[in-house]
Image (spheres, rainbow, N blue to C red):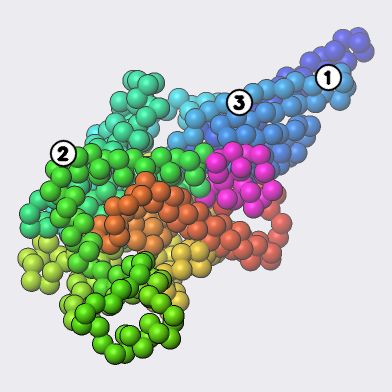
Amino acid sequence: MTLNSSYFKNGIASVVIIAKQNFILKLARALMLYGAPSHRLESQLVATAKVLSIPAQVIHFPGVVLMSFHDRVAKTSETHIVKATTRLQLGKLHRVHMIYRSVVHSQIGVAEGTEQLAKLIRAPPEYPIRLRCVFAFCCAFVICLSSFGGSFLDAGVAGCAGAILAYLQLHAVKRSVLFANIFEISTAIWVAFAARALSSWQGDYFCYSAISTAGVVLILPGFAVLSSALELASKSIVSGAARLVWAVSYTLFLGFSLTVGSDLWFILDSDARHRRQEAADSLTTISYINGTLFPDVNSTDTFNSLRQTLGGDLDGSWTFVNKTSNVSKLYHYQIVGCYRDPSWEWWRQPLPIWSLFILVPLYSLFNSFWNLQPWKSKQLPVMVSISCFSYAARKALQHFIGPRNEVVSAMGAFVIGVLGNVYARVFKGTAFTCMVTAVCFLVPSGLAAAGGLAMNYQGTTDDQYTSSIVIGVRMLSVAIGTTVGLLFSSLVVYAFGPKKKSALFAF
């Protein structure tokens, strides 16, 4: 009787242990699927296993989690591989965190938690594809007006490009594996091709820089670069380095594709290339020429005496300044690489500064919808508010110190981190999901402060392909500043008060 009772107890204990392990595995899959902070994924799962009294070891690689469960009685271990493709879904990620907190705080059992996670994974996305394409149009439309100096004409074209890009990303990529491998490159090429074709029309109705940058804003790898920088700062060397190499390479491909698309149109329309070169030359007030200056028959005595002093002809670099040029006025008409004449109609002009009070909340709202945040959620106003406060802080600091991307991004990220973490502590919300919209806004606005992805009216056409490296440098500078601000804000907020029982679910 005692032996049977012992077997019965051991059987129940084994069932409970297996149920806890299944919950941890399902939690790992859900967190990876919906875009949980990768630099805190290991600590999140280890803390969950510790609370559930399950000995576990976790190793995280991009897209893969290795989990090993150790049985101290049988002296055996089981290793599980969890693989998932990440797609940021804020609504479902918030629900995953709520289920996790309910299990950790013993509000529901592990079996019920596992079942809720399984139902959540099987559930369809929050919005259908057509509605998400509308959100993509609105995001590209608004960001073109607010950050890249575009007019209403530019914003309309950029919005259409964003909607087509979203449809290809959500529908066509899933149907063709071959197209999925070249999706970003091909879409960037045709967006740049269309933008260059429109900007080459007589009359300067469209701006290439505004359309090409805003049209691809939804596929910028800003979140991936930020995640890699956070992982490296958190001492996750392997996954952070791998993700950073991929993100930088992706950025270089994107910049290269934009240049290819622009040059394809120049091949078809050679006059457009000459007109662009003339526009670039007209904005040049200083010319540098290397060579030798020889005298002629009309040389002055001053020139001859200078030759005698130097002992020969004048060799070196010569600087010629056009002091009678009106180029300074032309520079005044440029806004983020777009030439705007004050005499043009209102629909060809950028919006005034006060319009940011409308455009910034609108972009934050549509970007939250694009990342599948439910419109009835209580966290939606919090997301928009944090994004607006962060943008205001960056604008104010930029007014005093100028366009220093890393410092301005650090200040904006610090404001985001403080507001998001304080909200999570006081109102028991999810800090990470509240901050994602504001953090995603840092990348396009930071690129806008650095001149966007492509400058239209300055520079020559020599060695254009190497200019794609500048995009990666700009992205890294924004990501590094954002990383410092987010980590420092977490330190400030969580340095005081009671210790959290669950792991930190924030940047």
Q: Secondary structure at mark 2?
A: helix
Q: Is residue 333 above or below residue 34?
A: below
Q: Amino acid at mark 3?
A: Val
Q: Secondary structure at mark 1?
A: strand
Q: Secondary structure at mark 3?
A: strand
Q: Which residue lies under the disc numbered 3? A: 82
Q: Which one is earlier in the sequence, the residue at label 2 or at label 1? A: 1
Q: Do callouts 1 and 3 mark residues in contact (Cβ within 8 Å)?
A: no
Q: Which residue lies under the disc numbered 1? A: 76
Q: Say whether residue 227 is magenta.
A: yes
Q: Amino acid at mark 2?
A: Leu
Residue at 37% x, 21% y is 178
Residue 147 image position (x, y, % from top left): 30, 60
Q: Is residue 26 visible?
A: no
Q: Which mark is residue 239?
A: none
Residue at 11% x, 56% y is 205
Residue 103 image position (x, y, % from top left): 63, 37
Label 3: few (<14), some or many (≥20) within 10 Å? some
Q: Which one is earlier in the sequence, the residue at label 1 or at label 3? A: 1
| Marks 1/3: CA–CA distance | 20 Å
Label 2: few (<14), some or many (≥20) within 10 Å? few
Residue at 15% x, 39% y is 268
Q: Which residues are magenta?
A: 226-245
Q: Which mark is residue 268?
A: 2
Q: Quadrant of residue 450?
A: bottom left
Q: Is residue 329 left or right of residue 28?
A: left
| Marks 2/1: CA–CA distance | 68 Å
Residue 410 image position (x, y, % from top left): 52, 64
Q: Is residue 498 left or right of residue 137?
A: right
